[in-house]
Image (spheres, rainbow, N blue to C red):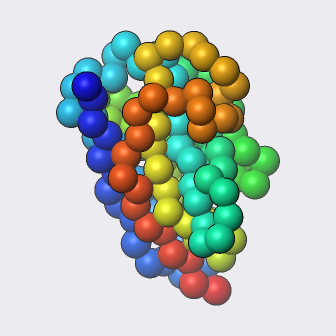
Amino acid sequence: QVQLVESGGGLVQAGGSLRLSCAASGSITSMYRMGWFRQAPGKQREFVVVISQRGATTYYADSVKGRFTISRDNAKNTMYLQMDNLKAEDTAVYFCAGSRVSRGAYYSTSSYDYWGQGTQVTVSS
C-alpha cells in the first residue's frame, strides 16, 4: 500500500508562487496516472491536473492552464506542482492522488485509489 504525503502549502500573496510536493512511501513508477485535486470550503473536490506514467502527457483544468505546471520524478517517488501567478480563487486544500490502473476519467476522483491528506494553500488578495 503506497502512502502519499503532500507538502509545500502555505500563505502567499496574489501573484506569488508555491511549489507543492507529493512524496510516496513506495515506488510511483507503476502509477498509471497521478494528479492534483483541490477542495475549497463548501465546494466539491475538483480536478486540477494529471500526469501520465512517464510524464509525457498532462491535462490541466482551464482555470490553471498556463499558471500551474505538474511534473514527476519517478526515481525520487515524488510528484510536484509548480503554481505561479496565484489568484485568490486558488485558495483550497490541495490533494495528490494516484492510480495504478487506467479506470474512468482522469478528472474524476473515483478514478484514483491513493490519496494524500492534503495541504492548505491560501492566496491573499
Q: Is 60 placed above or below 95 here? A: above
Is residue 20 shown left or right of residue 110?
left
Q: Is residue 53 visible?
A: no
Q: Is residue 65 visible?
A: yes
In the picture, the quarter occupied by the N terminus is top left
Q: Quadrant of residue 120?
A: bottom left
Residue at 50%, 63% in the rendered image: 93
Specify whether 111 is left or right of 97: right
Position of 16 relative to 71 (above/below): below
Taking 94 as reference, is 116 above or below it? above
Rendered residue at 45%/43% (across/down): 96
Q: Residue at x 41, y 56 (%)?
A: 118
Residue 110's x, y, as percent? 59, 32
Q: Is residue 10 left or right of residue 62?
A: left
Q: Is residue 34 placed above or below 62 in the rendered structure?
A: above
Q: Which residue is outermost to the right?
A: 62
Q: 94 and 108: which one is in front?
A: 108
Residue 122 lies left or right of residue 1; in this view the side is right
Residue at the bottom extreme, as displayed:
125
The C terminus: image quadrant: bottom right
